[in-house]
Image (cartoon, rainbow, N blue to C red):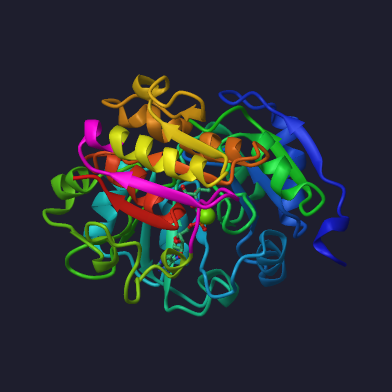
Amino acid sequence: MTPETKRTAFWRVDGSCPDPEIIRRAGSVLRRGGLVAFPTETVYGLGANALDGRAVESIFTAKGRPRDNPLIVHIAGIEMVCRYAGFVPEKARRLMERFWPGPLTLVLPGSDKIPKEVSAGLSSLAFRMPDHPVALALIREAGVPVAAPSANLSGKPSPTTARHVYSDLNGRIDVILDGGPAGMGVESTVLDATGDVPVVLRPGGVTPDQIRETAGAVVLDKSLADGATAPGRPRSPGMKYRHYAPSAPMVLVEGDRARVVEEIRKLAAGYAGRGKRVGVLCREESRDAYGGVLTVPAGAVCDHASVAASLYDALRRFDGSGVDVILAEGVDPRGLGLAVANRLRRAAGRIVKAD
Ligand code: TXA
Ligand code: MG
């Protein structure tokens, strides 16, 4: 069966107090090997029973995801990690107690209790306990760990609403649970906690400074060095793919705010002169700075959380807008800005430094 032939059910649920009957039906779809998209506090996930290799395999088909990119196992309590991880190092346990439920994924030693489709053959396994009433109720109801990547077609921006999921995966999955917009808007921090010093493989909702407070020390994977789009071989397989990308090519302009706006104006004039339709991904403060071109604002300059929350929706809005090229304002990579800057870099085909 091709992935497009399923009838996808779209069920609305209260995001803070989900109807137990709907959760019961969705849990039973998961237990029977089906695919259920659900909201989390970061982005929407596409879940399958992590103990069922065939169900997990069908996630890769539905998303068009490369088979070598492992999935995160979503659990509803620390005891589930103890049951399915090979081993839980002391530092990892402290991080779970401090940050779960929440946007921190911990890479731990794997075990043969979870089928190899989940870890894509790696000896480690990633675990996360999402901080969302619908996600937690669904995992508890299913009674099994739930393997779930973001619920988008591979390469597209992650979905922050059920509508985004529908537009990418309608006809390919069994159920979409619409619990309202995901709060944070960027994915969890992926942290390798298998060694003495934890390593950030993907920046996200929990910042390196917060991790340092609990773990004593933390380092960033080499592929996250300033300006790097992922040279060499990142330790998180997913980080080697271009990702989060709108259909039109995107040029990211980084540097001092005033210089960034000036540089984008110049680039826009150049593209327009060559007959190209230009779109600008900007901040609220600069939405009127680029007369005559389509501007899509995502958040405010000093409020990284507001940029994170609206970034993927803004990127998706360029699809179907008819623009030939997108010029994007960079963000200051501090705090949560590190995650936002990382996603912008990975979505961009070219990065220009404005200072
Ligand atoms: O916030 C999130 O993390 C969302 C929600 C749905 O939980 N999920 C998500 O999943 O973003 P996905 O599959 O789109 O991204 C998971 C990332 C990928 O970059 C993958 O390579 C990495 O985690 N990953 C998974 N297992 C790993 C492992 N054992 N070792 C290293 N990286 C791993
Ligand atoms: Mg993803």
Above or below — where is 144 with respect to 254? Answer: below
State how many labels appear.
0
Q: Is residue 153 magenta?
A: no
Image spot of residue 97 (x, y percent) = 29, 45
Q: Is residue 90 visible?
A: yes
Above or below — where is 63 with respect to 77? Answer: below
Instruction: Say whether residue 141 is left or right of residue 233.
Output: right
> In the rendered image, which quarter contains the N terminus?
bottom right
| Residue range highlighted in magenta | 242-260
Q: Nearer the viewer, residue 52 or 12?
A: 12
Image spot of residue 156 (x, y percent) = 58, 52
Q: Residue at x 30, y 26 (%)?
A: 303
Above or below — where is 337 with respect to 56? Answer: above
Above or below — where is 153 with respect to 64? Answer: above
Q: Nearer the viewer, residue 207 or 32?
A: 207
Image spot of residue 174 (x, y percent) = 79, 49
Q: Nearer the viewer, residue 257 or 74?
A: 257
Instruction: Say whether residue 208 is left or right of residue 266.
Output: left
Q: Is residue 244 magenta?
A: yes
> Could you say which quadrant of the image residue 122 lies in?
bottom left
Q: Residue at x 51, y 80 (%)?
A: 121
> In the rendered image, which quarter contains the C terminus?
top left
Q: Residue at x 20, y 43 (%)?
A: 210
> Could you say which quadrant of the image residue 117 lies in?
bottom right
> Could you say which quadrant of the image residue 235 lies in?
bottom left
Q: Residue at x 45, y 23 (%)?
A: 291
In this view, the residue farthest toward the left is 216
